[in-house]
Image: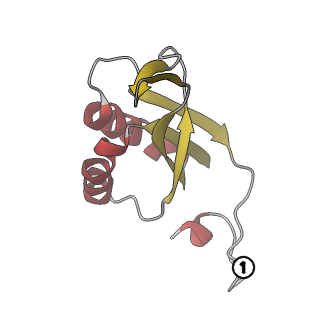
Amino acid sequence: MKKLEAIIRPEAFQTLRQNLDELGVKGLTVSEVAGCGQQKGQEGIFRGSRFEIKLYPKVKVEMVVEEQEVDPIINVITETCATNEVGDGKIFISTIDEVYRIRTGETGKAALI
C-alpha cells in the first residue's frame, strides 16, 4: 500500500475531487495548509504599508491506496492540477506497512474499502 499526499492550489480541488471519484478513489483526507517553495512569497501594500506574504494557501489531499492504483491517480492529479506555473504543488508517495480499521479490526485491503 502507498500513501499519496498532494499539495495543490485550492481552486483545483473541486475538479480533482470529481476526477478522483470517477477513478474510483473512495477515501480522502483533506486539509487546508499554507506553504511556499519557489514562489518565496510576494510583497503587498495595505493602507500605504508594505508587507511580505511568505506563505500561500494550499490544499493537502491524502489517500492510502493499493500500489497498482498509484500511477493512474498521479496522472489524474497532474492532469487536473497542472497550470504550468510555479506553485502548482507537489505529490509525495510513502510506503504504508499496514492499515487497521478501528471499528471492525479489519486490516490491509479490507480496511481501505
| Residue 77 appears in the figure | yes
The total number of labels drawn is 1
Residue 65 visible to an observer of this rendering: no
* Nearer the observer, 109 or 18: 18
Percent of width and height locating residue 113: 50, 71
Q: Residue at x 58, y 71 (%)?
A: 110
Apparent side of residue 22 relative to residue 56 in the rendered image (left or right): left
- Relative to 14, is 59 on the left or the right? right
Q: Position of residue 107 (x, y in %)?
A: 69, 70
- For disc 1, the marked residue is 102
Q: Quadrant of residue 85?
A: top left
Query: Relative to 91, is 1 on the left or the right?
Result: right
Q: Disc 1 residue type?
A: Ile
Q: Is residue 111 above or below residue 45?
A: below
| Element on which disc 1 rests | loop
Kindly indicate the quadrant of the structure image that contains residue 24: bottom left
Q: Where's residue 18, x and y in %?
A: 26, 56
Please tell me which residue lies in front, 97 or 51.
51
What residue is rendered at 39% in x and 58% in y? 25
Which residue lies at the image location 70% right of the left edge and 48% below the top edge? 96
Q: Residue at x 35, y 38 (%)?
A: 77
Residue 106, compared with residue 82, is above or below; it is: below
